[in-house]
Image: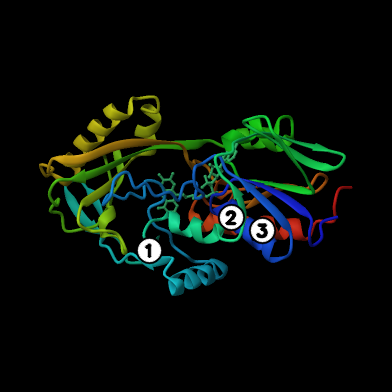
Amino acid sequence: MTTRGSKVGVVGAGVSGLVCARELVRRGFDVNVFDKGRVPGGRTATRMPEPGLAYDHGAQYFTARDPRFRELTADWLARGVVAEWPGRIVRLEDGAVIDTSPQPRYVGVPGMSAMAADLAAGILVRTGTRITAATRGPDGWTIVTDDEETVGPFNSLVVTAPAPQLRELLGSHPFGAAAATVRMTPCWAVMVAFESRLEVAWDGAFVHSSPLAWVARNSSKPGRDGETDCWVLHASPDWSAANVEAAPDDVAKELIGAFSLAVAERLPPPCYLMAHRWRYSHGSDPIDRRILFDREGGLVVCGDWLAGGRVEGAFLAAVRAAEAICGWNGPR
Ligand SMILES: Cc1cc2nc3c(=O)[nH]c(=O)nc-3n(C[C@H](O)[C@H](O)[C@H](O)COP(=O)(O)OP(=O)(O)OC[C@H]3O[C@@H](n4cnc5c(N)ncnc54)[C@H](O)[C@@H]3O)c2cc1C
């Protein structure tokens, strides 16, 4: 029976895991979150490799349509956790620069990771801990860490890892096999700083007919140190998939070349250049189910890949996951 005080394990401290954990803690559950990353945030990450340089190399910004997500966004805005990015966002298409329709785009301040830092406040999050297995026994769920520690039992378990990683984690549980059918595309991200400002009259661009899909002047986002001209370049899903095993230095050079072609400019010399591969970036066929819920065993699988594949989707899936745990009557 899940009641106040019931123990819940959550694998993953991205937006899904943290929103779910926060909701459960608010309702009196005893929640432990585990993440393999150094800090919470998952794909809403910010890298600060040197003083003055900062890059949101995963999620670029978010939009908010659902009333519940708008409510959280309004709270974040009021507390300065996020701000609206008033940047000019365009499409680069066959040499033309075309404005996109205006819509509020929000970013974490001073980086996208600010949202996760805020969500994680007051929650027990154990970072640097990869979970390698999860098993249900008579007392509930136990999980095994990468240094072979067994943790639990938990009355119920919420797993928010990207779909392709679930089979390994869940062993023979049918959700592992279901998730294995979901393809998630990779994305190569390049972080570059230029010695002098790149003179283009926009801040972010969706790029067409190029190895690149998106480029953004990170330093144009609010609350960033705008001194150094920092850019994030994202390769297209097709290019990323075709070059998934390429060496990061080669990827960086190639995508810088593509950037120069896309803006039809000679780029200023880079003073920082680094490529990062997101092996699981976006679900290619997002299923709109929000969660997979095993009512027999008290297992919930959730994540953006079940809910439209964006920050807002991750939030909505997590809210549904928390509701499922709260309404669950225990093992049959
Ligand atoms: C390059 C890129 C650009 C994007 N751009 C946008 C955008 O502009 N706007 C937008 O709304 N969304 C964007 N997204 C998508 C957005 O980042 C995601 O939808 C959202 O962050 C997903 O949150 P999540 O919690 O479901 O998953 P994740 O953030 O992936 O969190 C899952 C967490 O689980 C952890 N984990 C996985 N396996 C294990 C394990 N075995 N043990 C322990 N921990 C584990 C991971 O470390 C991770 O922290 C982008 C994503 C990428 C990669």
Q: Say what amino acid the circle numbered 3 marks.
A: Arg
Secondary structure beneath disc 3?
helix
At a point 32% along the width and 63% down the height, the residue shown is 223
Q: Are marks 1 and 2 in contact (CB under 8 Å)?
A: no
At a point 23% along the width and 48% down the height, the residue shown is 93
Sequence order check, earlier mark of 1 and 2: 2
Can you give x and y, in whole percent of width and height, for residue 42 in the image?
50, 46
Q: Please tell me the numbered disc located at residue 105.
A: 1
Residue that carries the numbered disc 3 in the rendered image: 320
Residue that carries the numbered disc 2 in the rendered image: 18
Secondary structure beneath disc 2?
helix
Could you say which quadrant of the image residue 120 lies in? Answer: bottom right
Question: In this rendering, does residue 287 appear at all?
Answer: no
Asked if disc 2 is less than 8 Å from ligand 1, the answer is yes
At a point 20% along the width and 57% down the height, the residue shown is 227
For marks 1 and 2, give the one nearer the viewer: 2
Secondary structure beneath disc 1?
loop
Q: Say what amino acid the circle numbered 1 marks.
A: Arg
Can you give x and y, in whole percent of width and height, for residue 197 in the image?
14, 52
**Which residue is most to the bottom?**
78
Distance Cα–Cα, label 3 vs label 2: 13 Å
Asked if disc 3 is less than 8 Å from ligand 1, the answer is no
For marks 3 and 2, give the one nearer the viewer: 2
